[in-house]
């Protein structure tokens, strides 16, 4: 491996380590076990949503609906729990709604030939409207079933259960992409769809799978977010859209530059979490994180422009 290859593959990771060490020096509270667990817990939702977005992007499709779909799935889940239905029914309903939106996104792209940028913006608007219609614009809050709340607030051997869920999902996503035929087919579909079609890979089905998994992960994130907050509102996951995209784009600057990959998404998410936490500890103004996210997106897009263009418009 040449020096240039090493820099392109691991330069962002090295910069992340430097940022981590910088905050460790700047704040005496940064390296405490409690703070590190706080960072991991805070990025759990972001990681889960970003993993789903990565599945879609690996298939060369862009899902801009995942945050609004997560909000709607949270409203469905939280509403059923709030009005006394069983936790199992609530979770199943929330996941079903998110999964349905993912499938619809896939069919709009593959059957109606609508570019994923347009299709998912449209379904995002539909999801947002349905969430506001169901709640009249207010959040449902209450003392909910402790077994449901544990899903977002519990601990396993002292570790927040959210960290456990996100770690399991991250491992599962990595395994599916790197160790299975499904992952090989999804990657081939995204990188060279015509060559994949000629090789016998069902590219339309794989694109539907990529967008469906994005919806499913949005639903899982929604269930855990709702359990953690013990509330559900029509915009509860809205803030995750830009940070989720930033995490995936940042991950595309690592390991396989210009290509979406699960390890990159994981480290990109962690870097954003470290950045957000560190900026708070050193007393940076509240808007500093938004500025940093914007810079991350601009820098990442410069490396990944061709992949994003293909995902957004099928070019």
Image (spheres, rainbow, N blue to C red):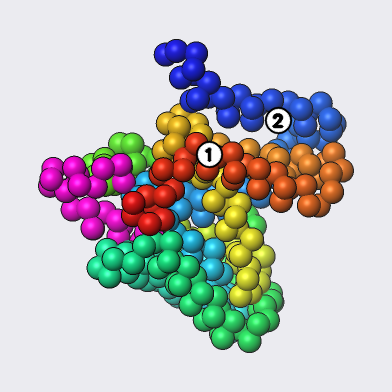
Classify mark 2: helix, strand or loop. Answer: helix
Question: 139 or 146, which lies in front?
Answer: 139
State the image quarter where residue 104 is shown.
bottom left
Pointer 2 with pointer 1, Cβ within 8 A:
no
Question: 294 or 130, which lies in front?
Answer: 294
Q: In which quarter of the image is the N terminus?
A: top left
Residue at figure coordinates x 16%, y 48% from the top left? 197
Q: 114 left or right of 204?
A: right
For discs 2 and 1, the disc positioned in front in the rendered view: 1
Vertical order, 50 against 238 (above or below)? above
What residue did someone put label 1 on? 302
Q: Crowding near pointer 2: few (<14 within 10 Å), some, many (20+)?
A: some
**Residue 34 located within the stretch drawn in magenta:** no
What residue did someone put label 2 on? 20
Question: 92 or 262, which lies in front?
Answer: 262
Percent x, y of residue 162: 58, 51
The extreme front residue here reads 315
Percent x, y of residue 98: 44, 68
Q: Give the range drawn in magenta.
A: 190-215
**Residue 203 located within the stretch drawn in magenta:** yes
Question: 43 or 141, which lies in front?
Answer: 43
Residue at figure coordinates x 56%, y 85% from the top left? 134
Q: Give the Cα separation between the discs numbered 2 and 1.
A: 24 Å
Q: Which mark is residue 138?
A: none
Vertical order, 235 against 62 (above or below)? below
Classify mark 1: helix, strand or loop. Answer: helix
């Amino acid at each position: 491996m040449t020096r240039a290859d090493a820099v392109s593959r691991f330069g962002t990771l090295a910069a992340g380590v430097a940022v981590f060490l910088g905050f460790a020096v700047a704040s005496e509270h940064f390296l405490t076990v409690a703070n590190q667990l706080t960072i991991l817990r805070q990025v759990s939702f972001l990681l889960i949503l970003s993993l789903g977005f990565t599945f879609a992007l690996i298939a060369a499709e862009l899902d801009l609906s995942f945050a609004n779909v997560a909000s709607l799935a949270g409203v469905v889940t939280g509403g059923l729990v709030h009005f006394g239905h069983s936790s199992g029914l609530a979770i199943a309903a929330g996941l079903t709604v998110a999964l349905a939106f993912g499938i619809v996104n896939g069919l709009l792209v593959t059957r109606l030939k609508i570019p994923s940028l347009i299709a998912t913006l449209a379904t995002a608007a539909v999801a947002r409207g349905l969430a506001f219609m169901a709640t009249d614009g207010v959040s449902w809050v209450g003392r909910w079933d402790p077994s449901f709340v544990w899903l977002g607030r519990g601990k396993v051997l002292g570790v927040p259960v959210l960290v456990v869920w996100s770690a399991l999902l991250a491992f599962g996503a990595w395994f599916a992409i790197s160790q299975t035929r499904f992952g090989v087919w999804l990657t081939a579909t995204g990188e060279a769809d015509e060559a994949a079609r000629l090789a016998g890979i069902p590219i339309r089905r794989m694109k539907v799978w990529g967008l469906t998994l994005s919806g499913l992960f949005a639903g899982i994130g929604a269930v855990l977010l709702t359990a953690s907050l013990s509330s559900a509102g029509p915009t509860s996951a809205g803030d995750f859209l830009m940070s989720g995209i930033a995490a995936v784009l940042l991950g595309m600057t690592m390991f396989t530059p210009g290509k979406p990959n699960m390890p990159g998404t994981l480290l990109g998410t962690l870097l954003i979490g470290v950045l957000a936490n560190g900026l708070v500890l050193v007393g940076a103004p509240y808007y500093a994180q938004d500025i940093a996210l914007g810079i991350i997106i601009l820098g990442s897009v410069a490396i990944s422009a061709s992949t994003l263009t293909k995902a957004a418009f099928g070019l």
